[in-house]
Amino acid sequence: MTAGASVAPMRPAVDLRAGRQRGRGPDEESREWLSALRGTGARRDEAVAGLHALLLRAARFEVARRRATLGHLRGDDFDDIAMQSADDALVAVLAKLDGYRGESRFTTWAYKFALLEAAVKLRRRAWQAREVPLEPEGWDLLAGRGSSPHADAEGGELLGAVRRGIAEQLTPHQREVLVAVTLNDVPIDVLAERLNTTRGALYKTLHDARQRLRAHLDSEGLSVSREETG
Amino acid sequence: MNERDDRRLLRGMLGPDGPELTCEQCFEELDRYVELELAGADADATIPGMSAHLEGCPACREDHASLRDLVASGDDPTPA
C-alpha cells in the first residue's frame, strides 16, 4: 500500500437512528425548559437567565477539573474563562434549540455545550505560550522505543513496523497529525487552531492515518489485536 | 520506557479496532450516551461506535468524562 492509496472513509458503525427510543420525547422538566425558552417576555427572559446560570455551573465545573494543570493562570482568569464559556454556550444552545431531540434531559443536553466551550478554551490557554511540537520530537521518541531491555522481540518488531509505516505509508499531513496527537500529546483542539482547521477534520486525518498503519502491519503479517495494545 | 508504555503508545497510534463515530456524531450523542450509562443501560449497544471513538479520541474522552461526572453530581436547576 502506498501513501497515495485510498482508505475506507470513516463512518458510523450502524445507522444511529435505529437505536433510538422512538416516541419517547422530552420529560416534563425538559418540556418546561423548551416552552419557556421559546416563549416571550418576562417568562423567556427568566428562562434564559436560568439557562445561563446552568451553563455557568457546568463551565465552572470544567474549570475546577482542569485548574491544577493551569498553574500560571490567576483566579480572575478562571472566572473569566468560565463566564465566557457560559456566554458562548448560551448562544450555541439557543441557536440549536430545534436540534434538541428529547432523548436526554434538556439540562444534560445543554451542559455539554458549556463543557465543550470551557474545555476548548482551557486546552488552548494551557498551550498558549507553548510551541506545538510536530514531527522531529515525536519521531525521536518513537525511534528510541522497542530497543530497550524491557521490550520483547515481538513488541520491538511491531514498533519497528509502525515506524516504517509512519515513514513510508503516511502523507506528510497524516504524519504530522499522528505524531502531534499520539506521540506528543498535543490536544486536538490546539492542533486544529494552529493548523486553522477543525477537531473533526483532524480526527478524520488521524483515523485515516491509523487505518493505513493497520493495513501496513497486516501487509507485513503483523496483526494487532486489542490484547496486544491494551 | 517499558512494555506498558510501549503498548499505550501503540494503542494511541493505531487507535480503536473497528468502526467508530466521528467527533461530530460523538458530540451529538454524548448526552444520551451518558444518561444511558448512568441509568445502568447498555449504552455501547444502543449507540454503536461510541466507545470506540472515546477510546481513540482523547478530547472527546475528556468531554465524556466531564459530562458524566457533572450529571452524576445531580442537583440540576429547573426553569423559573
Image (spheres, helix red, strand yellow):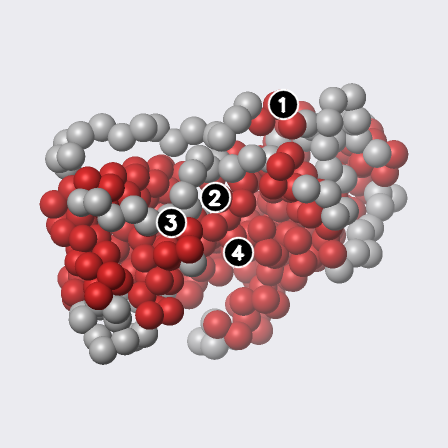
Q: Answer with the quarter of the image where residue A127 lies.
A: bottom left
Q: Nearer the viewer, mark 1 or mark 3?
A: 3
Q: Give the alpha-carbon distance from disc 1 to disc 4, as whole Å.
A: 27 Å
User: In this orientation, which residue lies closer to the viewer: A121 or A158?
Assistant: A158
**Labels 4 and 3 share a subunit:** no
- Vertical side of A103 occupied by A73: above or below: below
Asked if marks 4 and 3 touch (Cβ < 8 Å), the reply is no
Residue A61: x %, y % from top left: 65, 61
Q: Secondary structure at mark 3?
A: loop
**Left or right for A161, reference A126:** left
Do the CB atoms of the residues marked 2 and 3 lie less than 8 Å apart? no
Q: Chain of mark 2?
A: B
Classed neighbour count for the residue bearing mark 1: other residues with Cα under 10 Å, few (<14), some (14–19), many (≥20):
few
Mark 4 lies on residue: B62
Element carrying mark 1: helix
Nearer the camera: disc 2 or disc 4: 2
Labels 1 and 3 share a subunit:
yes
To which quarter of the image does residue B44 belong? top right
Give neighbour class at mark 2: few <14, some 14-19, many 20+ (Cα, 10 Å). Answer: many
Task: Give me the C-alpha separation between circle 2 and circle 3.
Answer: 17 Å
Q: Which residue is mark 2?
A: B53
Which is nearer the eye, A28 or A23?
A23
Q: Which residue is mark 3?
A: A225
